Image: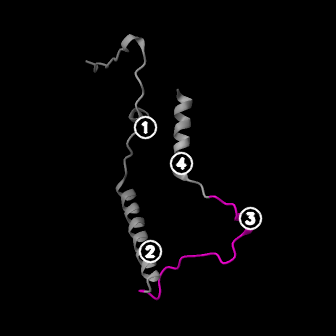
Amino acid sequence: SPAQKLVFNRVNGKRPPLLLQQISAPEECYTVAHEENVRFVYEAWQQVEQQLDGSRSGDSACGPVQYVEKTPNPGLKNFVPIDLEEWWAQQFLAKIENCS
């Protein structure tokens, strides 16, 4: 026999308030290859940071060099980098507002 369907009736015909968990994206599944890539990049970056810290304190004669522009481009004088987390938050809220 076919599986029974669950039916949820509204109380007094009103919609229940939406919870943030209901709106959020489904849980992501990561592959083993993805986890290996993330681990590789994380460990490599940790090494770079350790070498940078060592070269700042004078422990290492060679290693990564932090780039500092000697003559900044005047066209980039008022440049403000984008806050990616803020941008994603605004996109997420705009989607919610458009759906309701």
For disc 3, the neighbor class at 10 Å (few under 14, some 14 to 19, many from 20) is few
**Mark earlier in primary sequence (2, 1):** 1
**Mark earlier in primary sequence (4, 3):** 3
Residue visible at 38% across and 69% down in the picture:
43
Disc 2 and disc 3 in contact, CB within 8 angstroms: no
Spot occupied by residue 40 in the image (x, y as percentages of width and height) = 39, 66
Q: In the image, is residue 89 above or below residue 60?
A: above
Magenta-colored stretch includes residue 50: no
For disc 2, the neighbor class at 10 Å (few under 14, some 14 to 19, many from 20) is some
Magenta highlight: main SS: loop
Query: Callout 4, which amino acid?
Result: Glu
Query: Callout 2, which amino acid?
Result: Val
Query: Callout 1, which amino acid?
Result: Ser
Residue at which label 2 appears: 48
Q: Quadrant of residue 27?
A: top left
For disc 4, the neighbor class at 10 Å (few under 14, some 14 to 19, many from 20) is few
- Give the number of the disc on residue 86: 4
The residues bearing labels 4 and 3 have C-alpha atoms spaced at a distance of 25 Å
Residue visible at 56% across and 30% down in the picture:
98
Q: Look at the image and give the residue range highlighted in magenta.
A: 59-80
Residue at which label 1 appears: 24
**Mark earlier in primary sequence (2, 3):** 2
The residues bearing labels 2 and 3 have C-alpha atoms spaced at a distance of 31 Å
Spot occupied by residue 6 in the image (x, y as percentages of width and height) = 31, 19
- Give the number of the disc on residue 33: none
Q: Is residue 61 left or right of residue 33?
A: right
Q: In the image, is residue 95 above or below residue 72?
A: above
Magenta-colored stretch includes residue 65: yes
